[in-house]
Image (spheres, helix red, strand yellow):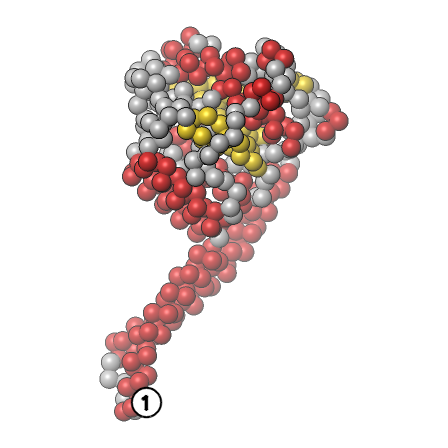
Amino acid sequence: MQDTPHDPSRGGAPAGPLRIALLVPCHNEAATVAAVVAAFAVSLPQARCHVFDNRSDDATAAIARAAGAQVHAVALRGKGNVIRRAFADIEADVYVMVDGDATYDAAAAPVLVQRLLDEGLDMVVGARVDQDPAAYRAGHRFGNRLLTRCVARLFGDTFDDMLSGYRVFSRRYVKSFPAHAAGFEIETELAVHALQLRMPVAEMPTAYGARPEGSTSKLNTYRDGARILATIVRLFKAERPLLFFSLGAGASLLLSVLLAIPLFVTYFETGLVPRFPTAILCSALVLLSAVLLACGLVLDTVTRGRIEAKRLAYLAIPATRGRLRAPGGAGREALAVPAGEGVR
């Protein structure tokens, strides 16, 4: 295995072989996993390939092992559970995560890794440029755009393809990521974690192809889209509680005012308040608004303390620096994927 040295002139981790781990989450990918392992062995021979078999019913594990990968069994079903296990168990300086469906371009991996090293980034996302109309279904494309824009509105506009399964991470990103999600919504958490800690991140266009014959997608457009949307709402509440609860407080107060207007009109005309239930409801809505605002203020303080703790844990890990030798002496330009219109 070819070593990739740290660059001591760049600071960060001490000089020594740069450890690169390839993480391949799989569920019933017997038709494609061997091709994925073989392609990355050619494009990124420095990496140790780890295939995480998530309760497959076929021969995924045996085929991956025969192809030269180290296979890990993950009992809890869901991509999020796989990533949590992978980030916890695998020790490396750079992590390359790719789905085991053979739709992502392995030749782009050295470029993604080198950009992470050169620019001191914590995450580089391979934004999908579909080469085949069948590669990316219209429903998935629309859902990706919608969810990416939701996250951009709430947490910051950095990514164009938030749900890509092709990413490169630094060690300090991986070891500071809490990983709460269980399923495909893990990509949303990956993006929000970087945005919350204001990590240096980037996107690069990468070719995206259709699944080979005999391979089927595990992603359900509506079910998983709903779960991702629910994750965005949960993260909005957890990471920006003051805004979240202020919206509820404002809605409650506005409803109270709208219901109270007829009562005030009647009171000024007759001096009476004939609809006591409505008056009581208005009072309750005002109290609810105050409680929601108080919750937002308290939780905002808690969240700031939690973010500071995560930031300190992130900073406790040295930054990764190094040089990546391209296989066969090829340069970065020869390995780069031409830019094009990504999935937006």
Q: Residue at x 32, y 79 (%)?
A: 261
Query: How many numbered markers are drawn?
Result: 1
Return the x and y of residue 280 as percentages of the image width and height.
30, 75
Q: In the displayed orientation, state which residue is furthest to the bottom.
A: 270
Q: Quadrant of residue 54?
A: top left
Point out residue 93 in the picture as x, y percentages from the top left corner: 60, 25
Hey, what amino acid is under mark 1? Phe
> Residue at coordinates 57% horizontally, 50% vertically from top-left?
305
**Quick one: which residue is furthest to the right in this view?**
9
Q: Is residue 94 above or below residue 35?
A: below
Tell me where residue 11 appears, x and y as whole percent: 72, 30
* Vertical arrangement, residue 255 with respect to residue 276, above or below: above
Position of 143 relative to 27 (above/below): below
Q: Residue at x 47, y 22 (%)?
A: 105
Residue placed at 75% from the left, 27% from the top? 9
Left or right: 304 in relation to 182: right
Q: Is residue 281 visible?
A: yes
Q: Indicate the quadrant containing the N terminus: top left, top right, bottom left or bottom right.
A: top right
- Residue toward you, 164 or 131: 131
Give the farthest residue toward the top.
Answer: 66
Can residue 88 be seen by looking at this rendering? no
Residue 82, image x and y in percent? 42, 28
Disc 1 element: helix
Q: Residues within 10 Å of mark 1 (few under 14, many from 20)?
A: few
Q: Circle 1 is placed at which residue position?
A: 268
Instruction: Say whether residue 238 is left or right of residue 330.
Output: left
**Within the image, what quadrant is residue 272 found in?**
bottom left
Quadrant in the picture for the C terminus: top left
